[in-house]
Image (cartoon, rainbow, N blue to C red):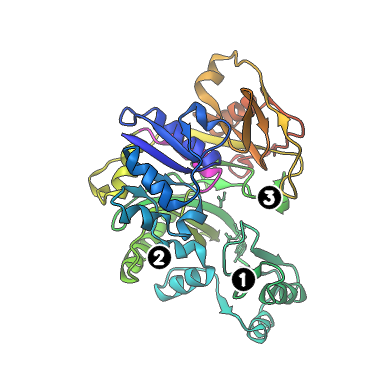
Amino acid sequence: MNVLIIGSGGREYSIGLALKKDDKVSKIYFAPGNGATDVIGENIDIKDYSDLAVFAKESDIGLTIVGPEAPLVDGVVDIFKKEGLVVFGPSAGAARLEGSKVYMKNFLKKYDIPTAIYVETADEKEAFDFIDTLIAPIVVKADGLCAGKGVIIAQSNQEAKDAVSGMLSGESFGDAGKKVIVEEFLDGFELSIFAICDGDNYKLLPAAQDHKRLFDGDKGPNTGGMGAYAPTPLVNKKIYDDVKELVMKPTLEGMKKEGSPFEGVLFIGLMIVDGVIKVLEYNVRFGDPECEILMPLIKSSVFDLFYKASTGELDSLNIEIDDRYAVGVVAASQNYPYKSTKASEIIADEILHDNLKENAHIVYAGVTKEDDKLFATGGRVLLGVGLGDSIQEARDNAYDILGQIHFIGKKIRMDIAYQALK
Ligand code: AMP
Ligand code: GLY
């Protein structure tokens, strides 16, 4: 069957890589893809979703997988379904869980799903009054999509108020900040849990940990994620059971009641506070770089998983997960996450070690191709992914393969998976 993958990052590259190994998949298309996805399949330059649906029909696409949140929030799944196409991802209605933090928080409250206490408001005075009841740090969030920048952890009550004013005036994030969430700061450790859902049923993937800050020791500005690993030993059976009972069950039932059954990947951002789970946020797509380490851990058919989730058949599917660990380390460009960096050629050494050939690979993200040469052009350029019987081994493999790839300004964190190793 032919598959279309919408998106251009490392996430989409890694999905393509997993599908390429699958016997059931004949040809893979990426829209738009990046400078390296054309080795896995064919890049298509069609931006309009209706035109893309026409392309999918004409090219005999049996499954479309949507990577990023923006097309989901914009309703690409609804457009494809209307054309009778099989597509993996939530409808625009269900994507509101990520597209609007106000919708998400009110949903959590309505269905009694554990989360930080908060107010949701467009009124400055109401926000200020609530801030006065809290002790810093205080969290202020813009309602809409802000490319991962809409969350401010204010270190004083005044800073929280300034953040609210900046958002409500439209100055900070335009319309996305016209409503805000103010919430208590949760002090614990973060986890990413991914559930592949078909509206009624779901399959949980191994729990992962991302590293959002730019520098070692979780210092510096927030980024899209500088590295991830899975499964994390910080998760025990109780946390998994709580996720199933206190989050997955009410979320899937709740979304059905709201008339927007959840299909696709539900990405639950959790904070564990003294063993108690709290939902920080939902995303309605795979995390990036979490996807890059989860794809190689799925031993059974990745195609079946996505296809059966898209056709409401997950209950009949058993998935098999590798019992190894995966660690992914991002190599970002020099000026990431502040501004773009001058393009620089990527030079890869020949991989001579058998261990690395078997247990490590590169996932390409922010790259372009010119005259058959790859150039680092994006913020997060590529990842080294390592597999191993222990986190240490997987991590060594990831760093070793990353050491064989060179471009000017290559920036990496040296402490990925430190929480699991300390
Ligand atoms: P979000 O987009 O809501 O996940 O927020 C981005 C990041 O901000 C999260 O990954 C957390 O690191 C942090 N964060 C968000 N909400 C809270 C909270 N209530 N307490 C502590 N940290 C938070
Ligand atoms: N890695 C976090 C995210 O994709 O939002």
Foreground: disc 1 or disc 3: 1
Disc 2 residue type (three-letter): Gly
Secondary element under disc 2, as helix, strand or loop, is helix
Residue to which mark 2 is pinned: 93
Secondary element under disc 1, as helix, strand or loop, is helix
Which segment did they paint magenta? 287-299
Foreground: disc 3 or disc 2: 2
Q: Nearer the viewer, residue 65 or 294?
A: 65
In this rendering, the answer to whether 129 lies above or below 77 is below
Most common SS among magenta residues: helix
Disc assigned to residue 361: none
Q: Say which label, 1 or 2, has the lower sequence index.
A: 2
**Residue at coordinates 62% horizontally, 38% vertically from top-left?**
366
Residue to which mark 1 is pinned: 175
In this rendering, the answer to whether 77 lies above or below 317 is below
**Residue at coordinates 61% horizontally, 74% vertically from top-left?**
180
Q: CA distance from mark 1 to mark 2?
A: 19 Å
Q: Say which label, 3 or 2, has the lower sequence index.
A: 2
Q: Say which label, 1 or 3, has the lower sequence index.
A: 1
Q: Position of residue 245 (x, y in %)?
A: 36, 61
Q: Position of residue 107 (x, y in %)?
A: 44, 71
Residue to which mark 3 is pinned: 213
**Residue at coordinates 54% horizontally, 27% vertically from top-left?**
361
Q: Is mark 3 within 8 Å of ligand 1?
A: no
- Disc 3 packing (10 Å; few <14; some 14–19; many ≥20): some
